[in-house]
Every structure is written in structure tokens, then in C-alpha cells.
Amino acid sequence: MVTKDEKKELISEIIAYWSNDWNKFVRDALCARLDREQQAIIESVQHNPMTAVASGTARGKDFVAACASLCFMYLTPRFNEKGVLVGNTKVAMTAPTGRQVKNIMTPEIRRLIRAARTKFPFCCPGRLVADDIRTDYEEWFLTGFKADDNATESWSGFHAANTMFVITEASGISEIVYNAIEGNLQGNSRMLIVFNPNITTGYAARAMKSDRFAKFRLSSLNAENVVKKQIVIPGQVDYEWVKDKVINWCSPIQQTDFNEGEGDFNWEGKLYRPNDLFRVKVLGMFPKVSEDVLIPYEWIEIANRNWQELQASGFIPAKSCKLGVDVAGMGRDNSVLCPRYGNYVPQFDVHQSAGRADHMHVVGMTIPYLKKKGAKAFIDTIGEGAGVYSRLLEEEFTNAFSCKYSEGTDGLHDITGEYEFVNMRAYLYWALRDWLNPKNGFGAALPPCDQLMEEATETKWKFLSNGKVIIEPKEDVKKRIKRSPDYMDALANTFYPRDYSFISDEELLKDFL
């Protein structure tokens, strides 16, 4: 039986043994397998006050953040010869939402703690309580909580000899919260921010340009699983996923066009130029959004976060359904149905038709929606959609409407009342843009969908000489993304206005929701 005093002595010895080499603690005590880039981040946190990490998908940013948190938690407190805590340590983990703390950060901490205690029973003392680690010392703890603009006083209690602030999904944290955190960066303090670089503005984006921060970028191209073409680190991004994204999200280029500073890269002996989706999700780089892009990447990300929050809350929509239907024709793989309930799209319904027109199947997918109270379906009737629309009329569904992208748009404007449009396609795409724009306050909520993300961020627009907005031809989009923008079309169709008799733009815009 180990006495209390003996336990304190063991803890002190453990701290002394590993305190000079945090990566050794991660490897030996936490039993964690980190690649070289992740090890460099741990080393940075050991020696640098502020560290920023921009990361691609499944690159282990939250895992390495958990490792760094536990290193600081257990290797920085100081005890005197009597086992009295004379240099206390406090670690705060936070994220934009409570769900992210509870479902992303806390599980990583718990797994690491359990592994360590199996091997070294006394190396990671403390009780795991909710999102916290509480030790026998009131001033030595780790805690996790949601970052809240209205509760910045939560940060006021983090004065200690050793303090660390770990922020995941850091691009979603407000300047107010960062200001509160920085007010506590005194003494032996650390700040570690990790994020997907989907937004080009804000604190996290500036950190990657600031000399205050040690900066790292975790590219999926360099992941050990990808480099070795086998699973070396479980849960990390794998070779097949990256290969698929290179094929679908990148364009081959010649050596004369190669510009590494723009994100161009060598993959298996060939040179490629990434689109914005690849830059963010694979390379861990910020999107290179130009002024002619219809919908910025960050707007879709915000809509995805809104959707996740609604899902977590058990949200049940009260609005009636507006169903956008894009029917696959010959040579196209997918028919896509998009049900929208006010600001909320629960999912996309997809039928893989293998390049064959399959009207009856799409009709069968559409009818259950049309039977709901107040539902309306808007079907692109240029091409194969005409067959679906005709069949629905035969079945006496008067709440199905024909949507032709070539229609005129006399009397229709954007949300400001200023812009006019060349055709219905331009109007619908711009209505979607207005709905997604966070400044307009619609609270758009979309399920995460790589296909829609790619289509939205790869679609361009411009003004014609007469001042009207035009969207680039669908054929140009198809050349870049190597398929038809079916998800975008289905979602845009939900904004079709022609089943109403509106007397003003204001009335029309109210019907967005």
C-alpha cells in the first residue's frame, strides 16, 4: 500500500524525469504515437509561449493538442521537499461549442489518461469529472468549457504559476474571448490554437502571419499513413482518401506553371494545382478566394456549424418543405433532391442512376415530400426533369412546379433591391448566396457535404455590360470539378419564386424562410 507521502514523492520524481523532454513523456507515459510534425508541435509548446497549428482533415490536430495539454498539466507543477505544491498549474481547454469540448477534446484526454495509468499508475493523478481533471490540490487542475462571448469572466480565475490555454476550432472563437485569454498570459504561460484554415480573417488567421506565434501547418500529404501507403497511425488520414482528392480536386499542371507558394505540389511524380477545397482540407492552407467566386468557403462552413448545432439540440423543423429536384440525364450519375425547411436542410437525397434516365424512381422519391402539408417541389424541367414533372402532374400533384433556368427575371432583384439578373439560373444562385451570407441573418443550416462545398466555391459570376448578374456556364464548372453541379442546382431550386404573386422584393425575400 502506497502512503500519501510516498505518492507525492513518486509524482515529484515523475515530473523531474520527463520535464525536460515532453515528447518522451508523450511516447513513454501517454503511449501516444506521433509523427515528426506532431512531435515538433509538442516541442514548440514546451518552449514557446504561443503556438498556432493550421491543419488538414484527420491530421491529428486535436490529438496532439490533448497530448500537449497533458504534458503541461503533469510536467510543469512544482513541489517542495515536503510535497507541498509551490508552483501550481491550470489548463483550460475550449472550443466554440460545448459539443466540441465534450465530443472532441474530452474523449482524447480520457483515452490518453487511461493508457498512461495502465502503464504508470501514479504518473497522471487526478479524478476525471465531466470535462475536467481534478487533483487533490485545488489549484492544480485541467478544465474544459465552451468559449462564450457573454461569460468572459470565466477566464478570470486562471492566474497561476503555470497556465495553459488550448483552443480547438480556433477560427470560430471571437476576438472578445481571445482578448480575455491574452489577459491571463502571465508567468509561465502557453497558448495553443489548432484549427482548419477555412476563414481568411480573424484571430487564428492573423496568428499564422504573426511573429508572436510559432507556426505549423499539418498537411495530409505528409501524414505518415499517406507517405507509407499503409495504416501506421490509426485514425489518421490515409493514402486512398488523399489520392481520391488529388484526382477530383486538383488540376495537372506543367513545370513552367508550378508555384509552390500558391499551393502547387508534386504527387507521385506529377505536378498539381489545388482548388480551395483541397487547400483547406488536405494541405491545411487558407482558401484562395477571388472576388468572382459566388460563395466563399467560410459561408458554407458556418452553415455546416449551424446544422451541427441544430442536430445536437434535437431540432424539429416547423416550416413547410420546399423541395429542389435536379434530375440526372444521360451521362450523369446522380439525381439529387434537396428538402429545405426554412433555414434548415436536413439532408440531400441522392439516386445514383449510372447515366440512365430513371424518371419513375425520382418520382417515387419526390411524392412522399409532396404529401406533406404545405410542401412544394421545384423541378428543373430542362432535359430529363420534364419527364418527372409531367408524371407528377399526371398523379395530380399540383404542388409541383416547373423551373426553367432560361426564364426571364423581370421584376426580380437581390436582397438589396439593386441587382438584376440575366436569367432564372442567375437569380436562383444569387438567392442562395444571399441566404448563405451570414450578414443577412438567415441562419442557414446545411449538412456537411464535400460535393456541395466544391460546387459552391468553384462557381463564378460577373456583371454584364448592362449591369445584370450572370453565372458562368455550367459547362465551365463541369470542366473544373469533372461533374455536373447537381447538389448546387437542387439547393438553388428551393428558392424558385414563380408559384407566388409578389408585389415587392420584400415579400419575396420573406419567403426565403
Image: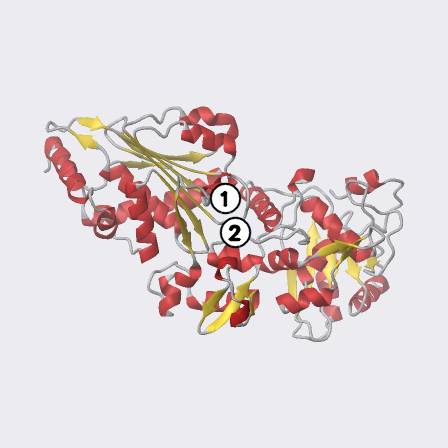
Q: Which residue was labeled with disc 1?
A: 205
How are the colours assigned in the image?
secondary structure
Badge 2 local density, few (<14 within 10 Å), some, or many (20+)?
Answer: many
Q: Amino acid at mark 1?
A: Ala
Residue 138 place in picture, x, y as percent: 27, 26
Quarter of the N terminus within the rendering: top left
Quarter of the C terminus within the rendering: top right
Element carrying mark 1: helix
Q: Which residue was labeled with disc 2?
A: 286
Looking at the image, residue 235 sits to the left or right of residue 510; the answer is left
Residue 350 place in picture, x, y as percent: 64, 63
* CA gap, disc 1 and disc 2: 8 Å
Instruction: Tell me which label, 1 or 2, sits earlier in the chain.
Output: 1
Question: Does residue 494 show up?
Answer: no
Residue 195 place in picture, x, y as percent: 46, 47
Q: Amino acid at mark 2?
A: Phe
Question: Does residue 92 show up?
Answer: yes
Pick whichever, 458 or 442, lies toward us. 458
Residue furthest to the front: 256
- Quarter of the image for residue 400 reads bottom right
Residue pictured at 46% horizontal, 70% vertical: 267
Callout 1–callout 2 Cβ contact below 8 Å? yes
Residue 510 place in picture, x, y as percent: 78, 39
Looking at the image, residue 124 sits to the left or right of residue 421; the answer is left
Badge 1 local density, few (<14 within 10 Å), some, or many (20+)?
Answer: some
